[in-house]
Amino acid sequence: MEDMEDLSQQQKVTAVASIGDPLRRSLFEFVTRSGTAVDRDEAATALGIPRGTAAFHLERLAESGLLETEFRRRSGKTGPGAGRPAKFYRRASTEIVVSVPERHYDLAAELLSSAIEEAERTGDPIGEAIERVSTEFGRRLGTEAGSLEQMLEATGYEPLATDDGGLILANCPFHRLAQWHTATICAANAALLRGAAQGADESARVVRLEPRDGHCCVQVRAPIVEKSNG
């Protein structure tokens, strides 16, 4: 099963929407409260519904990533004559966080926590550690994405192309933190995206702090083209 951290925003929204159905939500809550894996018969009996109905909704919950499955024999016996294994369901261990617009406070927490550990290890000022850690993390993201624009899309920045070949970022994934701790978060944000440009082999793009209302504080300018003297 795909890890929730690797799911797209649309897949996460779909997973959460899957428990909008009252019966499906009741099944999910029953499995959650059970504290152990349950099979279709147990779920059907608990909710007073047909086994086939319970099986259908449990499968939908598993497909959306809200439940995990396992196979084992109810008797605990193995070998010939022990019977066929039954399918059991338990709540997924991963968490699903959905926000509209898309936010990534978990990424901000990872950057800041890593920077604190780096500063304690090296004795460097925390500001330098934040810039170094954010740049390196951004490099990895840019390399994995293959292009700066794909990295921005995947991380929720909502890049919009400008007439001069640059990018305006319509969303800040760290919006609330940036409002409370503007200098720190915006500096980390800029370093993250500079690193992403490097990792995507787009270092010629100019990534800089350029705050504007209703947008991310970082803007991406088109590559600077040097004019020839000829």
Image: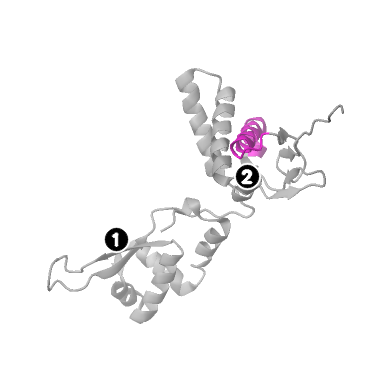
Q: Secondary structure at mark 2?
A: loop
Q: Is residue 49 visible?
A: no
Magenta stretch?
178-203
Q: Which residue is mark 2?
A: 147
Judge the density around disc 2: few (<14), some (14-19), many (≥20) Cα neighbours within 10 Å. Answer: some
Marks 2 and 1, how far apart at CA: 44 Å
Residue shown at 30% from the left, 67% from the top: 88
Question: In the orientation shown, which residue stands out farthest toward the left?
Answer: 80
Of circles 2 and 1, which is in front? 2
The image shows residue 9, relative to residue 20, as above or below, that is: above
Locate residue 165 relative to residue 141 in the image: left or right: right
Q: Which residue is mark 1?
A: 36
The image position of residue 117, as x and y in percent, is 46, 27
The image shows residue 24, relative to residue 166, as above or below, that is: below
Residue shown at 76% from the left, 48% from the top: 161
* Magenta highlight on residue 183: yes
Residue shown at 72% from the left, 33% from the top: 208
Give the dominant element type of the magenta stretch: helix, strand or loop. Answer: helix
